[in-house]
Image (tube, grey):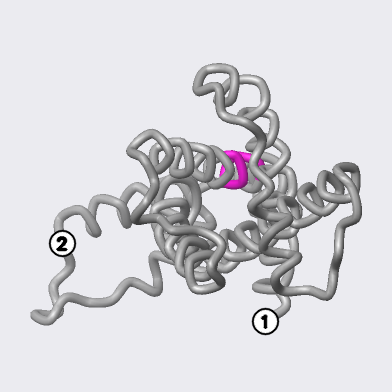
Amino acid sequence: MNQTMNLVGRGVVAGVAGSGVMAAFQKLIEMPITGREASYQPAKLAKKLLPIQPEDEKDWTRLNYAAHFTLGAMWGAAYGVAASRGHRGAGAVARVFPAIYTNDVVVSTSLGLTKPWKWSRQGLIVDLVDKFVQAAATSFIFDHFLDPTDRNEPTAQRSKFAEQRIPRPDNRTSQFDEEIGSLERRHVSN
């Protein structure tokens, strides 16, 4: 349990940093290309869920950033859970992104904040790309800077999770499993 909480905590940090990457990507790349104005969707979500009443544009901007980074922290926590199950990189993003993105759209829609069926194709693509940038950045930051596994022995972590493989119904291992096991044994013995 402690290791899981450690990875979730590291995921939260990576998620906050990933949100910073997403904000920079939006401001410096995506918005100049698409001509889209800044979105206050995170602030609208926070206002809907909390007893908060922004009074002016400055308040809205502060609330927007606070909500944006809080949502990123939650995405990062989900990445930390995936990491605690042995998933890293693209595999972890492939598991976390669809679930979190779908939840994001469902919650926003159920609260009356968005109507995805009215989004333009460009609007949908922009939303997917922006949030994928956040997920990929979270993954990169976690895997390269915050992952507690020993970088000098990358297969040590894989070996731990290889022991948890689910056997095939006929109790045989696949040729791939045998080759990976052989490579892992050679690496550990060197």
163 over 37 or under it: above or below: below
Q: Which residue is mark 2?
A: 174
Residue 189's disc is: none
On screen, residue 54 versus residue 3, left or right, reads right
Of helix, strand and loop, which one carries label 1? loop
Camera-nearest residue between 159 and 123: 123
Q: Secondary structure at mark 2?
A: loop
Q: Quadrant of residue 171?
A: bottom left
Front of the two marks 2 and 1: 1
Q: Nearer the viewer, residue 152 or 7?
A: 7
Q: Residue furthest front?
A: 55
- Would residue 165 appear left or right of 86 to someone viewing this image? left
The quadrant where residue 36 appears: top right
Which is the main secondary structure of the residues drawn in magenta?
helix
Is any atom of residue 160 visible in this view? no
Q: Give the percent coordinates (x, y) of residue 66.
A: 81, 54
Residue type beneath disc 2:
Ser
At horizontal 68% and vertical 44% (from top left) the residue drawn is: 19
Q: Look at label 1 and name its amino acid.
A: Met
State which quadrant residue 12 falls in.
Answer: bottom right
The boundaries of the magenta stretch are 137-141
The answer to whether residue 89 is visible is yes
Most distant residue in the left direction? 170
Q: Which residue is mark 1?
A: 1
